[in-house]
Structure formats: C-alpha cells, structure tokens
Amino acid sequence: MTDSTPLPAPSAHALNQGGPEISPVAWGMWRLTEDNGCSPQERIEAALEAGITLFDTAAIYGFNGDNGFGDAEALLGAVLQDEPSLRRKMVLTTKGGIEPGVPYDSSAEYLNASLEASLKRMGVDHVELFQVHRPDLLTHPEALAATLQAMVESGKVGAIGVSNFTKAQISALQNFLDIPLATTQPEFSPLHLEPLQNGEFDQAMQNDMTILAWSPLGGGRIASAESTRERSVALRLDSVAKEFGVSRAVAAFSWIAAHPAHPIPIIGSQTPERIAEAADISKVTWTRHSWYEILQAAMGEKLP
Ligand code: NAP
C-alpha cells in the first residue's frame, strides 16, 4: 500500500517571537546585478507579487573576487530610494562577517562596522534580521553573543541568526545569548542534504529556529541536470511537477518546504518570470511516499 496522506503544507509564520510574519519562500540577492536584462526593481516587484516578503542579502554580495563588495546592497538601496514604499512590504535580512582575504571576522568592531555600512548602502535604519555569514573560529561565542545582543538592543536589528554554522557552533553561541537565535541558514536542496542528516534541522525544530535554505536548486544544477544523480532527482521532481502543473524548480522548492521544520527556500533566480513561479508552491502536495522518493533519488540509494 502506498501512503497517500498529504504532508502538512508550509505557511507564513513569525520570523521570531513577536516579530514580523514571513513567507514560506524568500528571495536572495547574491546574484543581483544591474545587467540582467531587467531592472532590480522589476525583480523585487516580481518577488512581492509572488507573495514573497523575506528578502535576503549580505554585505559581501556583489563581490567578484576583486571588487564589488556591497554592490548588491547598494542596488537594493537605489531601488528603495526610487520607490520607498517597497521597504514597508519587505522583511529585510542582511549578513556580515566575511572579509575577503582574511577571510572571516566576527569581532564586535568588524560586525558593528559591517552592519552600519550595510544600513547605509541600503538607505534603511534597521533590518529585521542580521545573520553572521560564516563562523569566525577566532571569536569566542560569548563575545559574539554580546555583539549580536547589543545590535538588537540598539534597535538596528530585529532578530539575529547564523549561516553556515555547525550544530555545535550554534549551541555554543545560543548558550551565551539571553535571546533566541531566530534563524540558521545552511545550504540545502535535494543535491545538498547535509543539514537534514547532521542534526541541524532537528536542532532548529528543538529551538524553534527558522531555517533559510540557500541554493535550493543547487545553484541551478537541478534546473539543468547533468550528472546521473542530478538527472535522477530531476526525473522524479518532473513527475511531481507534472502532476501538480508546476515547474521542476517549484517542485524542488516545495519538497524543501514540506519537511516538518518547513525550511524556507531562498530563490536565487534573477529572472522575473522564474521568481513569479514562487506563487505556485502551495499547489504541490507531498505524501510520505513521494517525498521519500526524491530523498532516495538524491541519496542515490534506497533507505533500509
Ligand atoms: P538557486 O535557486 O539554487 O540557483 C539560482 C540559479 O539557478 C540562478 O543562476 C538561476 O538563473 C538558475 N536557474 C536556472 N534555471 C532556473 C529555473 N528554472 N528556475 C530558477 N532558477 C534557475 O539559488 P542561489 O542563487 O545559488 O542561492 C539563492 C540565495 O541563497 C542567494 O541569493 C543568497 O541569498 C543565498 N545564499 C546564501 C549563502 C550563504 O552562505 N549564506 C550562499 C549562497 C547563497 P536565472 O537567474 O537566470 O534564473
């Protein structure tokens, strides 16, 4: 017998206790540049029209190996300057802590300066969420906790989170905080299963943290599947996509969001038509059977 009971659908929920409501899908600005055949404002409006309220950026976005640090935030700032009403529709998150050439710095001095520079580039006085982009092994978690807490107390940051931290690093940081970490942002997709398998998702559910899944299409490899593993995942996603009349990408986003932690896929596309597809996520219903089919294709083996 094949189980046909639908898995609960993701829905909008609060970013943190008492915080703003966030959509089950986010839009990311890592790839935000001017020369994409459409304006940054068109992309932002496509995301808002698709029901996306959570917008993810970072101080380093725009960096191309030589320069461009901060350019994505500056582009967003230009859009908000032209159309200030857009800001009220957004739950805005940025990150700091990567310094090219170092490579990581989570000292109070660096993170505070990074936040100030981000706010200035975007022309805003606060962000709803600030995340530490990558763990700095040379900052004691007690010192990092004090820095993040002071950011919240200053009113410049609504909530705090981390990205690319191990489970142990998250626990160590939370231990020194008086407020809960609202988010963790790992890479997660059918092509990158690590946080599902290493306990990070379980920790997030235990601590009521929101998971933001970066590169939900494996950086595009799910859309243009090449390897045997990618093609096997794509084939199974396509059969779900066909059943519900959505694209393969939407099938992948909804597979991510169907996990009981309801991870929020951060869509990376810069094409308005593809961003608009995010609205279709609620069309897909998963069952245990169909969800595990994708997982097993992704693992390349049957579960025992
Ligand atoms: P992704 O959604 O896995 O990949 C997006 C890429 O796939 C784009 O280049 C897009 O091209 C391409 N693509 C090809 N076919 C597509 C289709 N049918 N539908 C949608 N996209 C298609 O995500 P990502 O850009 O790698 O990452 C998403 C976000 O995660 C970033 O913007 C950033 O906010 C966040 N991120 C965080 C970290 C971190 O360390 N915290 C690291 C990486 C990313 P087009 O633009 O031409 O559509």
Image (cartoon, rainbow, N blue to C red):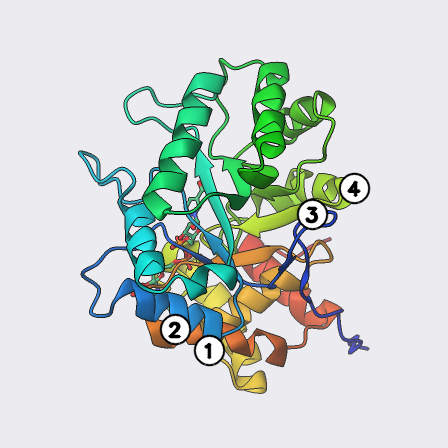
Looking at the image, is 270 positioned above or below residue 173?
Answer: below
Q: Badge 3, how many Cα within 10 Å: few under 14, some, many 20+?
A: many
Q: Which residue is mark 1?
A: 247
Q: Determine whether the beta carbon of the residue marked 1 sits less than 8 angstroms from the nearest atom of ligand 1.
A: yes
**Helix, strand or loop at disc 1?**
loop
User: What is the distance, in whole Å, between disc 2 and disc 1 at their CAs?
Assistant: 9 Å
Question: Residue 231, located in which quarter of the rendered image?
Answer: bottom left
Q: Badge 2, how many Cα within 10 Å: few under 14, some, many 20+?
A: some
Q: Which residue is mark 2?
A: 274
Q: Position of residue 195 (x, y in %)?
A: 61, 43
- Which of disc 4 and disc 1 is earlier in sequence? 4
User: What is the distance, in whole Å, between disc 4 and disc 2 at their CAs?
Assistant: 34 Å
- Which of disc 3 and disc 2 is earlier in sequence? 3
Q: Amino acid at mark 4?
A: Gln
User: What is the distance, in whole Å, between disc 2 and disc 3 at their CAs?
Assistant: 29 Å
Q: Which residue is mark 4?
A: 206
Looking at the image, is 64 positioned above or below residue 30?
Answer: above
Ligand 1, seen in the image, is in the quarter at bottom left
Q: Residue at x 40, y 26 (%)?
A: 113
Q: Closer to us: mark 2 or mark 3?
A: 3
Q: Determine whether the beta carbon of the residue marked 3 sits less than 8 angstroms from the nearest atom of ligand 1.
A: no
- Which of disc 2 and disc 4 is earlier in sequence? 4
Name the one closer to the observer, 107 or 28: 107
Q: Amino acid at mark 2?
A: Arg
**Helix, strand or loop at disc 3?**
loop
User: What is the distance, in whole Å, between disc 3 and disc 4 at their CAs?
Assistant: 14 Å
Q: Which residue is mark 3?
A: 16
Q: Determine whether the beta carbon of the residue marked 2 sits less than 8 angstroms from the nearest atom of ligand 1.
A: yes
Disc 3 vs disc 4: Cβ atoms closer than 8 Å?
no
Disc 2 vs disc 1: Cβ atoms closer than 8 Å?
yes
**Helix, strand or loop at disc 2?**
helix
